[in-house]
């Protein structure tokens, strides 16, 4: 039985802030993708790191 659209039991995103529709992508070194995906909550942690990196660069420039 297929899962019905617009149901009340659908998965909900638990993010503090909404995400952008455009993706940020870069080429990592060999093996990094698999190791990264093994880390729990890696996407949110990476988003926070990007915010930190932007903040640090703003203080230096």
Image (cartoon, grey):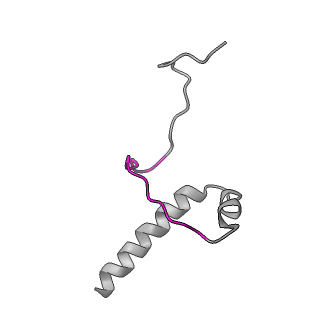
Residue 24 image position (x, y, % from top left): 44, 59
Of residue 12 and residue 33, the one placed in the foreground of this image is 33
What secondary structure characterizes most of the magenta part? loop
Q: Which residues are magenta?
A: 15-28
Of residue 26 and residue 60, the one placed in the foreground of this image is 26
Q: Quadrant of the N terminus?
A: top right
Residue drawn at x 67%, y 57% is 37
Quarter-of-image position of residue 30: bottom right
Residue 41 image position (x, y, % from top left): 61, 55
Of residue 53 and residue 26, the one placed in the foreground of this image is 26
Q: Is residue 26 above or below residue 5?
A: below
Q: Is-magenta flag for residue 1?
A: no
Residue drawn at x 49%, y 69% is 49
Q: Is-magenta flag for residue 26?
A: yes
Residue drawn at x 28%, y 85% is 61
Residue 9 image position (x, y, % from top left): 56, 23
- Whether residue 4 sits left or right of residue 35 in the image: it is left
- Whether residue 14 sits left or right of residue 34 in the image: it is left
């Amino acid at each position: 039985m297929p899962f019905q659209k617009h149901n009340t039991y659908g998965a909900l995103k638990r993010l503090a802030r909404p995400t952008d529709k455009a993706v940020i992508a870069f080429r990592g070194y060999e093996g990094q993708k698999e190791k990264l995906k093994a880390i729990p909550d890696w996407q949110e942690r990476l988003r926070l790191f990007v915010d930190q990196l932007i903040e640090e660069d703003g203080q230096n420039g």
